[in-house]
Every structure is written in structure tokens, then in C-alpha cells.
Amino acid sequence: MLIYVLRHGITQWNKLKKVQGVMDIPLAPEGIELAKRTGEALKDVPFDICFTSPLARAKQTAHYVLGNRQIPVIEDKRIQEIDFGVLEGSRFKDEQGKIISHEMEIFFDSRSENEGFA
């Protein structure tokens, strides 16, 4: 069995370096274009089934990648992004790429003694 895992295309909030989490942000035009190009690159892959999170950005990506293929698309909340709570919608990096929020720095810094994202 071969499993393909794709990340959703870019959203406006990705471009603004905002925390999305479970906020239902759709793809930006660039994200749609990238999903279409990915679909073209994978056009000869014989997918049997597609799993997607229920978030718009993931469903849109699946739609554009799959194109006209007639395969089951199953939405599953268990594979959606985690809920960042009050941090959702806030910027996590400044213009120089430095993480703004101490909480986000702890979360993304695997060198931290705190439990984080690895």
C-alpha cells in the first residue's frame, strides 16, 4: 500500500503568518493554483480513496488535486489542524520571521523543556 500525504495549499492567513488552527480559512488564489499543479503532477497516480479534514482549505485542496476522478472523499475531523484557542487569528512571526508569541515559541521549539510540537 502506498499512501500520499499532502498539506493544504496556501491561504491568506498563511501569507500573513497568522495562526489558523481550526479557523475555516479557504485557499488563497495561489493555493488553488498550487493544488491544481499538484493534481496535474499526480494525474497518473491511481488513487482509490481520499481522506481530508472538514476544513475548507483541506477540502478545496483535495478537490483541485483530484480533479474529475470519481473516488470517495471522506472527511475526518481527526486529521484536522489542532485548536490553538485564543492564539488563532494572531500573527506568530514578525516581518523578520521571528516568532512573536512566547506560547507559540514554546510550542514550535523542540529544544524547549516544555511539551511542544515535534
Image (cartoon, rainbow, N blue to C red):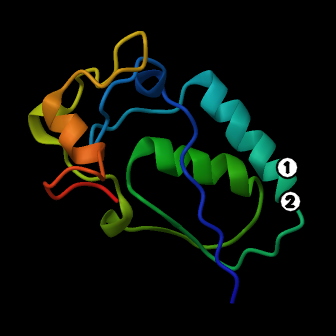
The residue to which callout 1 is attached is 40
Q: Amino acid at mark 2?
A: Lys
- Placement of the C terminus among the 4 image quadrants: bottom left
Circles 2 and 1, Cβ within 8 Å, touching? The answer is yes
- Say which element carries label 1: helix
The residue to which callout 2 is attached is 43
Residue farthest toward the left in the current orientation of the protein: 86
Lateral position of residue 33 relative to residue 111, left or right: right
Please tell me whether residue 49 is drawn above or below residue 53 in the rendered image.
below
Lateral position of residue 33 relative to residue 9, left or right: right
Query: Which quadrant would residue 5 be assigned to in this image?
Result: bottom right
Residue 14 appears at what percent x and percent y?
A: 45, 27
Residue nearer the viewer, 95 or 21: 95
Lateral position of residue 18 relative to residue 104, left or right: right
Query: Which quadrant would residue 84 be assigned to in this image?
Result: top left
Residue nearer the viewer, 52 or 3: 3
Residue depicted at 28% across the width and 37% down the height: 23
Crowd around label 1: few <14 · some 14–19 · many ≥20 (10 Å): some
Residue 15 appears at what percent x and percent y?
A: 48, 20
Crowd around label 2: few <14 · some 14–19 · many ≥20 (10 Å): some
Q: Amino acid at mark 1?
A: Glu
Residue depicted at 21% across the width and 32% down the height: 88
- Placement of the N terminus among the 4 image quadrants: bottom right
Residue 97 appears at what percent x and percent y?
A: 42, 20
Residue depicted at 14% across the width and 36% down the height: 103
Residue 6 appears at what percent x and percent y?
A: 60, 57
